[in-house]
Image: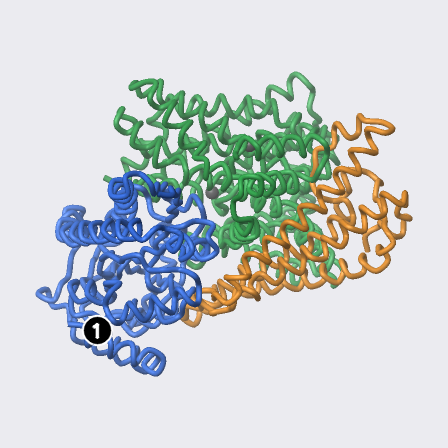
Amino acid sequence: QKTFEFRYGHMNPPNSAAGMQAQWLAEEIAKRTSNSVKVTVYPSSQLGKLQELAEAVSTGTIALSHNTAAGIGSLHEPFAALDTPYLYRDVDHLMKVMDVNSPVMKKLNEGLVKDAGVRVLYAYYFGTRHLTTNKPVKQPSDLAGMKIRAIPFPIYMATVEAMGAVPVPVDWSEVPTALATGKVNGQENPVNVVLSSKLYETQSHLMQTGHIMNAQVIVINEKAWQGLSAAQREQLTAAANEVRRRATEMVARQEATETEELKKNKMTVIGPSDGLNLTAFRTNVRKAVDQKFGAKYGELYKAIEAVK
Amino acid sequence: MEAIPSPAGPRVPAGPLRALLVPLCRWFEWVAMALLVGCTAAIMLEVFARGVFNLGLPGAGELARYAGLGLIFLTVPLLLAQDAHVKVDMFLQLARGRPRRFLEVFNELMTLAFCVLFLVSCWWFMQRASRFSTPALAMPNLWYYMPAIAGMALTTLVALDRVLGIFMGRQARPDESRPC
Amino acid sequence: MSLTAITLFFLLLLTGAPVAIALGLGSALALWWFDMPLAVMAQRIVNSLDSTTLLAVPMFIFAAALFNVTGLTTQLFDFIRMVIGRIRGGLGYVTVLTHLVFSGVSGAALADIGALGRIQIDMMREQGYKDNFSAGICMAAATLGPIFPPSIPLVIFAMAAEVSPVKVLIAGIFPALIIALFLMGMVWWVGRRAGLPRDDISVTRGEFTSRLWFAMPALMAPVVLIGGILLGWFGETEAAAVTVVYALAAGLFFYRALTWRGFVEALRETVRSTAGVMLIVGAAALFAWVLTIDQVPTKAADLLLGLSKDPWVLLVIVNLLLLVIGMILETIAAILILTPIIVPALVAAGVDPVHLGVVVVLNLMIGLLTPPVGMSLYMVSTVSGMPVERVIRAALPWIGCLLLSLAAVTFLPAASTWLPNLMLK
Ligand code: NA
Ligand code: NA
């Protein structure tokens, strides 16, 4: 049996959920393939930045990496649709869609392999994005004129805009300063990011808008994948399934405790029971998304809806 | 105000193509200068749009970075033509006669090798990545890398010309090496 | 592979090849030799330069060039000379203070040198200072930029270490003042020993007022910029572009001295300085990639941190490690690679991560002055036209002075932690 050494590069700190699951994958693969496939993890953007990493998997510079669906969208456009706001019924629905054997993912994966020479190995639940600001927000009109930092992907910009705010792109390295000086009045991210980057120091309120449910997509270079023996591919799939389950469980479990932690740090959490008009946010955002992306992704949305 | 003084002194080998390449380098520099204006304008547009019109412009930031990237690579060929790249030439200055000539030839060849490898690397990269697109403007990668490719292609020609020049024993006349 | 890359780099550097070529070709040949995909060469060089943060470099150089062609620089110089000209080594103190004020705007040392370096060195040249002194103090004072808030390296450290970015930013204030004091002490000492120049000009009240008036746009620039950042009008990188527009406006409407020719000259000078230095930055990123693949920095850190459990010993180890790493790695790369290893080990030993952030960043700022990969050295060489080897010699005494400040910042944790703990509970 041939042996392989794979490099797994990503942008998260090693002790974050994303960083930990990468390490788990390396360990599971080593265990299941009896060390015939060795994975070395390079965290914290050591080998490159967001999009660069996705491209590096495509060119084969590194074998493995992960990215949000929108990030993978730079390699094969339809992936961007998976980060559509208010798309999934719940985490379970998201994970069923993201299963590499689901009809939706099978088709997307084929396109990705063909376009970019990249294959989705697995995806896990990365978190649900909420809004943080410096004043209470209960309905879209409360956000009028407020500048909210948004990722410069079209779908993210459109979401923040449809929520009623002014979406403003700010480089992540400047976000803490921008929030402190008021260059932007808020931002949106899953709770674990709010907690680990200590954004509660500059932001007083967390609104549980849950506007985008993210999966982290782990990809492998297709040539590296095809180079493996059939047995090794099976072992990698088994490792992937195990890590996918553990990581999703961990993230979902921690979301509640992380929200409590934010409350302890004097953040006011506003959920539907505190008067957050989730229906209004949902209606406005869905309407805007249908207008802007309906023609392009309509078929895909239907297929996702159909996954039970 | 003068251009950056060349730390290596007047040693500028000039090949047969120099009369053609130097004006081309200058044209590239003009484009780079225009990109600098564009870069400033894009950033200011973003500041004004946000501050005055309460509008976030995702494309402006990307355009500014694109211009900032372009102006670097489009100026690189002229810097080589004028020997203005930063270097540590302490030992080169100490050497005399044949060793010195060897070092000079060696350096020019290494510069040429760098340029060629860069272009080969771009070619390899573009096999796959030419159609991938940027996040905000969905600009294809090939366009995004074009300033770098064009700049390094011209640098390769300049480097080649210098290698030819040094083997033909030609020194640049003052009017050929003087900037603008 | 790392060893091959390092050897080739030194070899090429010493034969007098351009620094960017020595770094880039050395790394590319190592990649090729070890059968790694060559695509990474173009990808890393281009992508590392495709950065919002780095845009501040051409912007600040452009602003400084505009200040030069409109005569604003000369006006500022005349005014400063009038105020402190009679003090021995006065311009040395002014250099430190202008960098300190400017650090309230900028978050990157290279941008600081781009903005202030040429003006300062030209001024000092005109007044009879030796180039070695001017180049040295300019580089040394530029380390203040990323220590005093705002600061990109401190924020990146905070994010990587998962400590409060706001706390780490505030933590930089007192250490920056300490460094400034050390640098001014050095100016005083050199002034005494080597006899730095002093003026014997005297001015009337009328002259004073008129020179103050003409220096006003320059003196007001930091007020406008720091005010704009604090009010949230623009961010760190954007502040650089605002400076350009400010310089244009001052040249057109206040001095009425900005000509088309002058504008084109400023553009030309900016693209040339930028291209020369940035190509080295890109090549250094490729070099760092090669070292990272072999996990050289990670392994070195793991090895050294295992040597002790005592916080002070560990802090000394971290300082030595970072000084060595800082010689060959670029700042941001070094922070991203080493933070996840250093922080857990030192926090377990009882070191405050906020204090550690300031120590790490100061170390890497000193690394900007240490050869062979010292971006400040190359930047100063570019803006002043001095050969690199002379710039390196000029840097040596100031590295000594910075090491003393580093010792002070390392062994006085309270200087970093007191203010943030007071302001943020
Ligand atoms: Na600063
Ligand atoms: Na260094």
Does A114 appear above or below C213?
below
Image location (x, y in percent) of residue A185:
32, 60
Which quadrant of the figure shows ligand 2? Answer: top right
Q: Residue at x 45, y 57 (%)?
A: A58
Nearest the eye: B143 or C174: B143
Q: Quadrant of the C terminus of chain C?
A: top left
The disc labelled 1 sits on which kind of residue? Phe
The chain holding disc 1 is A
Is A264 on the left or on the right of C338, as rendered?
left
Instruction: Please say whether residue C66 is visible from this viewpoint.
Output: yes
Does C236 appear above or below C77?
below
Is C363 on the left or on the right of C134, as rendered?
left
Q: Label 1: few (<14), some or many (≥20) within 10 Å?
A: many
Does A220 appear above or below C101?
below
Quadrant in the rendering for residue A225: bottom left
Residue occupying the far left of the picture: A273
Image location (x, y in percent) of residue B154:
72, 57
Circle 1: element type: helix
Residue placed under numbered mark 1 in the picture: A281
Image location (x, y in percent) of residue A118:
40, 60
Nearest the eye: C243 or C83: C243
Tell me which chain appears orange: B
Does A103 appear above or below A182?
below
Residue occupying the far front of the picture: A1
Tell me which chain appears green: C
Image location (x, y in percent) of residue C418:
31, 31
Q: Exactly how many numbered labels are in the figure? A: 1
Is A105 on the left or on the right of C235, as rendered?
left
Q: Residue at x 37, y 36 (%)?
A: C339
Tell me which chain appears blue: A
Instruction: Please say whether residue C54 is visible from this viewpoint.
Output: no
Q: Residue at x 32, y 81 (%)?
A: A294
